[in-house]
Each structure stands twice: as structure tokens, then as C-alpha cells.
Image: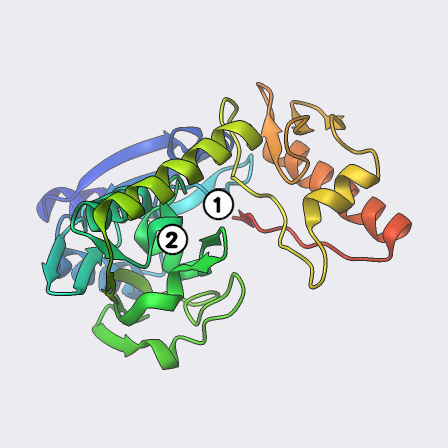
Amino acid sequence: MIENFLIENKIKYLKDESLKKHTTFKVGGKADFVVSPSNLSVLSKLIKYLNENGIKYYFLGNGSNVIFNDQGFKGVIIKSQGFNDCSFDGTKAYFGAGVSMTYAAKLCGEKGLSGIEFCYGIPGNIGGGIFMNAGAYGGEISQNIVYVKYLDENGDPQTICKADCNFGYRHSCFMGKKRFILGAEFELTPKPKDEIISFMEDIMKRRIEKQPLDKPSAGSSFKRPEGYFAAALIDECGLKGKSIGGASVSEKHAGFIVNNGGATCRDIVRLADLVSDTVYKEKGVRIEKEMIIV
């Protein structure tokens, strides 16, 4: 039934698709369907169809902060890659949800517009960045947002201003709700191009030096507890290199859990829980997982 709908509406899809191919952690079982709608009209129609027929679905960007269950996903994974429009109007920039944060930062830098250079090197897309209010090196994606466009739970287009997005540390109003982020407008600040590019190059240099970019991961695995740094707490507990199955705490950066090859979702979750419990037992500080488990 769903396959006929996808064919009739010319929606690109993959059937019985391994979700390892769609996340940076390279774990997870198979999804019934992974689809890539190409425009707003088709996406809206798809969401309405899935709702009417009681078919489970999940929105996915670059999969850089998500791990899927080893049993897979019984339903439809809807990817945002078709929403990759970019436009500029003076100091304002609009980026679709499927635009990579690194590419968006690079485009702004080339135009001498400052505000999202900290995004350079973050593996996620704009949509995912807004969803979790991604941040690094003192910046958060919410800082420069003017408004966000999205489809609500009924598949109808909406626009919400920054003040109503309920942004917080790794939090937004989109979490826990079936809202498909379409894109956002950003207000940026003019700045010499060479200064912006120099800052981004420095960020990338630090990432390469300090982070295990050579191994599959979901980036930083734990949220920063107030008043502490998760990586420092984990390191102090002697957990660098700790492994369960194919997953281990990175020797290079204790805040990262990495896939050494053949890791499962279960391995990663068990290791993350062990790390959290050990830190709480030894330091009295509870650290929470940053990655989303589906």
C-alpha cells in the first residue's frame, strides 16, 4: 500500500534499507522504507497519508546524532536532504533543513557574514542542528535564528519565531513532537572574510587534533553537566578505552563513544549507561546521553 503511494507520487525511496548507511555511527537494523521527498507539497501529502493510515514515521537529517535500534524501524524514515535551498538578502540568510552546517558556515564566511562559523566541522545538517540546538566553541545555532519554517503534526506548513522555539541547551520545541523542520532564516553580522575563514580553519584544526574523526561516532556522546565538562569527568574515572562489544570510549577524547567495527546499538547504549553510572558513583555528577536512540 505505502509502496504504491510512493510510486504514484514519484517519491524516491529505498525498501528494507539498512540504517547503518544513514547514520554516522554506522549501526542499526533495517527500515521498511527510507524516503526522500523533493518538495513541500509532496512531503505534506506524505505525512497526511501516513497519519491517516497509522503508519509510523521518523524524520532524519544527516543521522549524526542518532542511533537506531538493532531490530530496525518498522515504518518510514523521512530524510530532509531534498530541502537544500540557500539564499541571502543583505545580512539575512535562509538555509533549508538538508543543508550541511559546515557548508552553511562556509557560504556565510565567503560572503563576510559572521554568526554561525562555529558550525564549521559539525557533521549534522541545519534541520538537525535546529532540532537539538547544536553548538560548539561557545556558540549555539539558536543565537542567530530569526524564524523557523516547519510542517506540523498534520502536515501543514507553519512558521515560528525564535522566541517561541523554546531553545535551551541541546533543546528546542521540536523535540518530542512530529514536526518536520523545513529551514530557517538567520540574522548575521558583517565581518572581514579573512577573519571568519581563519576562525573556521582554527576550529577544524582543533577538531582534528582532539576528536576521533577517523572512527564512526555520533560526535559528543554526552551532554555537558552544569559546572563540569563530561569528557574531563569520564577521563578522571579512568574510562578512556573502556569497551563493550565493538563500542569503546575514545582514547583520544573521553566524551566520544566510537564504533571500532561491528558495534551494535546495544553495545553503545550499555557502554553509555556504564559511563554515566560510573561517573555518578565516583563523582556524584549525572551525565546524560546527547545522542538520540530510536
Residue drawn at point x = 14 percent, y = 52 percent: 85
The percent position of residue 247, horizontal first and vertical second, equals 65, 27
**Which residue bears the numbered disc 2?**
128
Q: Secondary structure at mark 2?
A: helix
Distance Cα–Cα, label 2 vs label 1: 8 Å
Viewer-side residue, 253 vs 111: 111
Q: Residue at x 60, y 43 (%)?
A: 221
Left or right: where 76 falls relative to 274: left
Q: Quadrant of residue 172?
A: bottom left
Binning the other alpha carbons within 10 Å of mark 1 as few (below 14), some (14 to 19) or many (20 upward) gives: many
Q: Which mark is residue 65?
A: 1
Callout 1, which amino acid? Asn
Which one is in front, 100 or 270?
100
Q: Earlier in the sequence, mark 2 or mark 1?
A: 1
Mark 1 element type = loop
Q: Is residue 31 visible?
A: yes
